Image (cartoon, coloured by chain):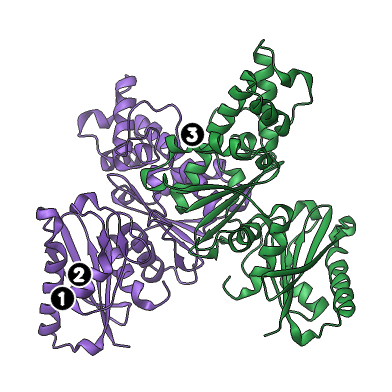
Chain colours: A purple, B green
Amino acid sequence: MGKYCFGIDIGGTTVKLGLFEGTDRLLEKWEIPTRTEDQGSHILPDIAASIEEKISEKQLKKEDLIGIGLDTPGPVEKNGFIHRAVNLNWEEFNLEETLTALTGLKVKAGNDATVAALGELYAGGMEGYQDVVLVTLGTGIGGGIVTGGQLLYGSKGGGAEIGHMHINDDETECCGCGNKGCFEQYGSATGLVRLAKKKLSESKADSALRKTEVTAKAVFDAVKEQDPLAMEIAEEYGRYLGKGLAMIAAVVDPQAFIIGGGVSKAGDILLSYIKKYYGQYAFHINRDVDFRLARLGNDAGIYGAARLLSGEN
Amino acid sequence: MGKYCFGIDIGGTTVKLGLFEGTDRLLEKWEIPTRTEDQGSHILPDIAASIEEKISEKQLKKEDLIGIGLDTPGPVEKNGFIHRAVNLNWEEFNLEETLTALTGLKVKAGNDATVAALGELYAGGMEGYQDVVLVTLGTGIGGGIVTGGQLLYGSKGGGAEIGHMHINDDETECCGCGNKGCFEQYGSATGLVRLAKKKLSESKADSALRKTEVTAKAVFDAVKEQDPLAMEIAEEYGRYLGKGLAMIAAVVDPQAFIIGGGVSKAGDILLSYIKKYYGQYAFHINRDVDFRLARLGNDAGIYGAARLLSGEN
């Protein structure tokens, strides 16, 4: 067993890399661009080269290295097989085997939101928690589930694809996935903006939102200023989120929901709207749950990726 | 490590007991009544006495016994703590510790539907499956989830309380749990009968269902006879089930759904209605899933309970 590892978070534009002591103490982090051209064929060799460079710079011995933990967008099976990562132009292959062949190191891979959940659980001040759901509210909705201390991968790496849980029968517009009424059509930052624009066009009421670009941030900034129309929008947004999270709770019964992604920058006021409606939809045994804001921000991925090597997942 | 164990399934009217060789080969099964009077305080002593009797009858030595696997209605935490089992008049206590004190044997306990899922997985001809969801369609809807080969307990033993997942915003009647729009209001046998009665009162069409007591069995018997109104009812019922299972799949991504409970006696025709609508609501990565009928019937509980002692759950 070596003493250092790498935690790597592959995003659509940058790859974040971290060098860790053990699988939990971040020593140094850096980034390289994600080169998605040529079917994303440069991404893993670029990562391998960057790691080699760091190993050489730090004069690390290979026998002192535990390995590489890695996350990526898209469903990843427990054995490292990736089905497709649209943002990276990747088709099906085994991520772990391929990066091991390039580096000679042990590799453990997982889906980005799922791995971020592991990061928040073990490095985000949640000691003692074993059952958590991370929900990232960004362009879409990402999810990561830890149950009994273990990552929930699902049979095809599609565990916690909660953004595509059906929550509305009356939707007429299609989600990016082709279905109608998916959770992320309402609960994502995109969904919030859509909802806000709809409310603004339906109402004649004055609002700070009429004088600015409508973004998730603008909505919650206006809520903090007690803007009535923005507060109405936040109520409806909170209802969608509360309902969706209650549905998830009926399936996995978490101790805590950790809310991350761009929308979560609104802070505690976002949680207050979610909690209000969660209680209305949740089954009684699921009601007593903590709501937390994600703490690690962009570092959740590298922390969680390193943690993949702890031998417990 | 001993050679025999007991698998016990506590129901509201009878307790089913099985003596197993190892944790998988059923040697003998029998039943005793569930005495729910006096806050259910006789149930565990009755079980302990029945086990003692069997041990004595078979001249088993205590050192040859692996222990007792046990399931019960209501949420059970991974440590054996039960929150409440309404049907048994039980309040909060630790089931495992209590039965160990009575018998001197190791005890491992779980929720009934969850344990039945384990039974179907390991004794119901599903070798090689690691990720399954058992859905029992009876008076209510029960659920049991196995993910990565492990039982999903949830933080308060409320994992897979899928009957109380919210799936309909327009419901005006309350579910038994107090909420409105729970999955079991539509997908259970009770829900099917309610739906059938509604259709029968709204329509003037002739139907075999007008000449008989309306039960889940009567509806699917009529479907098999191509009764048009019954087929319309089955379509709507299939839509509710397909939608609900697609929601669950977005959270845990199973390889297979196993359908049990009274309604499942309708057989493959039930699965055909579920599959038709499941495909419409499921996220693409969750679409390729098997639908199976539960095979073990009333024995799923004792098989699963024995399997709790295998050391893997």
**A267 and B296: which is toward the camera:** B296
Task: Quadrant for residue B279, please give it.
Answer: top left
3 vs 1, front mark: 3
Tell me residue B190's x, y (percent).
Answer: 70, 35
Find disc 3 in the rendering and name its residue. Answer: B277
Find disc 2 in the rendering and name its residue. Answer: A17
Tell me residue B63's x, y (percent).
Answer: 76, 87
**A186 and A80: which is toward the camera:** A80
Q: Is residue B223 depicted above or below A175 in this figure?
A: above
Q: On what subunit does the disc labeled 1 rest?
A: A
Q: Is residue B291 depicted above or below B41 in this figure?
A: above
**Few, some or many C-alpha atoms within 10 Å of disc 2 (few <14, some 14-19, many ≥20)?**
many
Q: On what subunit does the disc labeled 2 rest?
A: A
Residue drawn at point x = 61 percent, y = 61 percent: B118
Determine whether label 2 and label 1 are within 8 Å by CB.
yes
Find disc 1 in the rendering and name its residue. Answer: A51
